[in-house]
């Protein structure tokens, strides 16, 4: 009997120490430094020690340096902030692209055989090409560059979001085709004072996203956005007080084209350059003119003239525009409104 009591107490003590074994199970900041002066040398290593479903705010502070790694923030994380020491000099980068062979990656032998039998070469694809993928909720990125520096050989995503309540503040998001993919319907993402550059459809996806005072830089003649907003979502992409810029070689830009039916994109109080086509928008496929939700309100600049816009886009009235607030766009039962 005494032995059983002793064993029970021993097991309870062991379980307590196992639970509290990690020194990182606390709200303290974790420091990452490529030069070895931090606790970890990669962002991935710091993410791995964070406790699942944290009920406190955890900061991963990343010192200046270039971190070549493919970062995944799994869905069991929450309340994590990744903060760079300097936006321009703290860089997470990778160079995967959609047409890269899958030979160097995990690939089911059975699926590989099926693809080869159908005459298809196993390739990475757009949705595996990310540099950073965020499956977690309640994640913030600050003062950091996230880059996909692959050659122009196909789609190459820098940031791929799947989680809800994701925030980017003073970040640089660099790439070519498909730089930012906001992938999950009914999730919310906020970009605040960020710089985003790319070529074709370089902001695309189904999430509800607010861009506040961002610089959107176009590197080639192409389309800025490709929304795939679901029909039941009231809002998709909202650009507020943003500045669109273009490289010297650019002569023809469209504000967007609908990747799927019911794509929603609104530019309001934005500065549009002369390279914006007079028609403003592209239909991608003719039938999408019937469902696309493309709008503008009180934009300025040489590209803001709406007299020749496509008939299936529209200009908001002042009364309508007054109702488009960040609080309303992000409205859910949780009351989330990033500031």
Image: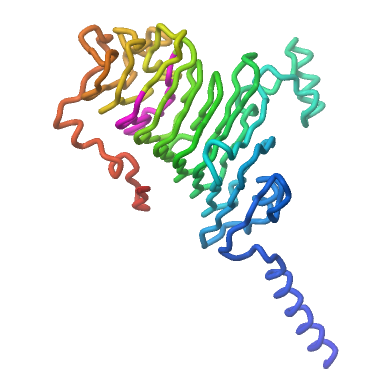
Q: Residue at x 51, y 44 (%)?
A: 141
On the picture, is 292 further left or further right than 202?
left
Asked whether residue 64 is drawn in magenta, I would say no
For the image, the number of numbered tags is: 0
Foreground pick, 77 / 4? 77
| Residue closest to the far right | 3
Residue 262 in view here: no
Residue 311 in the figure: left or right of residue 254:
left
Relative vertical location of residue 67 with respect to residue 300 in this rendering, above or below: below
Rendered residue at 27%/13% (across/down): 302
Residue 270, image x and y in percent?
Answer: 29, 26
Quadrant for the N terminus, please: bottom right
* Quarter of the image where one finds residue 7: bottom right
Residue 54: x, y in percent?
56, 60
Instruction: Answer yes or no: is residue 16 visible.
Output: yes
Q: From what the image shows, is residue 245 above or below residue 173? A: above
Question: Which residue is pictured at 75% across the width and 14% down the height?
Answer: 121
- Compared with 167, 103 (above or below) is above
Quarter residue 224 falls in: top left
Q: Is residue 235 magenta?
A: yes
Q: Residue furthest bottom?
A: 2
Residue lying at 75% horizontally and 19% vertically, measured from the top left: 101
Residue 50 image offset from top left, x and y in percent: 63, 56
Quarter of the figure with residue 329: top left
Q: How is the image coloured?
A: rainbow
Q: Which residues are magenta?
A: 223-243
At which x and y percent is residue 133? 59, 37
Closer to us: 277 or 39: 39
State the residue in front, 315 or 150: 150
């Amino acid at each position: 009997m005494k032995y059983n009591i002793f064993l029970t107490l021993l097991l309870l003590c062991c379980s307590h120490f196992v639970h509290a074994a990690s020194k990182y199970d606390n709200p303290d900041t974790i420091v990452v430094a490529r030069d070895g002066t931090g606790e970890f040398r990669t962002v991935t290593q710091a993410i791995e020690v964070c406790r699942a479903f944290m009920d406190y705010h955890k900061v991963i502070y990343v010192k200046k340096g270039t971190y070549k790694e493919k970062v995944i923030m799994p869905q069991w994380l929450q309340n994590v902030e990744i903060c760079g020491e300097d936006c321009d000099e703290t860089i997470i980068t990778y160079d995967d692209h959609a047409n890269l062979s899958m030979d160097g990656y995990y690939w089911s032998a059975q699926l590989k055989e099926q693809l080869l039998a159908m005459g298809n070469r196993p390739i990475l694809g757009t949705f595996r090409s990310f540099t950073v993928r965020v499956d977690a909720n309640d994640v913030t990125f600050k003062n950091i560059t996230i880059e996909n520096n692959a050659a122009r050989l196909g789609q190459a995503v820098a940031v791929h979001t799947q989680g809800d309540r994701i925030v980017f503040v003073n970040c640089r998001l660099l790439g070519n085709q498909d730089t930012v993919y906001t992938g999950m319907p009914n999730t919310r993402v906020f970009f605040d004072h960020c710089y985003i550059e790319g070529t074709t459809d370089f902001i695309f996806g189904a999430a509800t996203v607010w861009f506040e005072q961002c610089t959107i830089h176009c590197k080639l003649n192409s389309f800025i956005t490709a929304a795939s907003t679901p029909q039941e979502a009231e809002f998709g992409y909202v650009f507020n007080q943003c500045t669109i810029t273009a490289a010297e070689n650019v002569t023809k830009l469209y504000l967007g084209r609908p990747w799927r039916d019911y794509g929603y994109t609104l530019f309001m109080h934005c500065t549009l350059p002369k390279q914006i086509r007079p028609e403003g928008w592209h239909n991608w496929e003719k039938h999408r003119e019937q469902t696309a939700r493309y709008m503008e309100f009180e934009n300025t600049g040489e590209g803001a003239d709406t007299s020749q816009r496509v008939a299936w886009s529209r200009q908001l009235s002042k009364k309508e525009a007054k109702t488009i607030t960040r609080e309303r766009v992000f409205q859910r039962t949780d009351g989330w409104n990033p500031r």
